[in-house]
Image: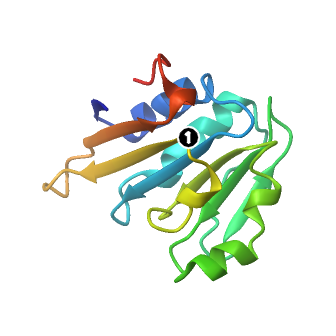
Amino acid sequence: MHELTVPTAEDMKSFGRRLAGELRAGDLVVLTGDLGAGKTTLVQGIATGLGVQGPVLSPTFVIARSYRDGRLPLVHVDAYRLGSLVEVDDLDLDASVEESATVVEWGAGLVEQLAADRLEVRILRSVDENDETRRVTVSPLGARWTGVAIA
């Protein structure tokens, strides 16, 4: 497990760009954190690090967005409105997980069956609403992440 302090939204994007440098096809990243914690901001940094062109928007209403113009395909999922494993299965994410880096916001308890090896990233906001600082905990699971520099 790795813990880091992320002072600003730009620093969260920077962390995402560094994380993107470690991602490869088949990787699953599961993001958790309260509303406004910075999950989409982190994904924007990952997308930039992968070379995705154009804006990266939250997939809240469309559930999943795919970006195929980077170093490797990126699938960005928002599972907030999904209530069961059946609904996740209906997205057919397992069809693209082998060829893409898949990042799932609100995916804890719903998408772990997609990959035994994954990164679980928890983002905690400061109790002070005026403080942008986030505490990020990265938990690498499985042999894929052994020895990979995360922070």
Q: Name the foreground residue: 27 vs 143.
A: 143
Q: Residue at x 58, y 76 (%)?
A: 85
Left or right of 126, for residue 115: right
Please say whether residue 101 is visible from this viewpoint.
yes
Q: Residue at x 37, y 37 (%)?
A: 138
x and y, in percent, of residue 87 in the image: 65, 81
Total marks shown come to 1
x and y, in percent, of residue 43 in the image: 57, 46
Q: Name the foreground residue: 71 vs 55.
A: 71
Amino acid identity at mark 1: Asp
Corner quadrant of residue 4: top left
x and y, in percent, of residue 121 in the image: 41, 45
Q: Name the foreground residue: 83 vs 70.
A: 83
Q: Residue at x 78, y 55 (%)?
A: 66
Which residue, given by chain and number where applicable, does mark 1 sit on?
A: 117
Q: Is residue 140 above or below residue 148?
A: below
x and y, in percent, of residue 39 in the image: 46, 52
Q: Name the foreground residue: 98 vs 123.
A: 98
In which quadrant of the rendered image does the N terminus lie?
Answer: top left
Q: Residues within 10 Å of mark 1 (few under 14, many from 20)?
A: some
In which quadrant of the rendered image does the C terminus lie?
Answer: top left
Please say whether residue 57 is visible from this viewpoint.
no
| Colour pattern of the rendering | rainbow
Left or right of 109, for residue 133: left
Q: Residue at x 35, y 55 (%)?
A: 37
Q: Is residue 61 above or below residue 147?
A: below
Q: Is residue 129 above or below residue 120?
A: below
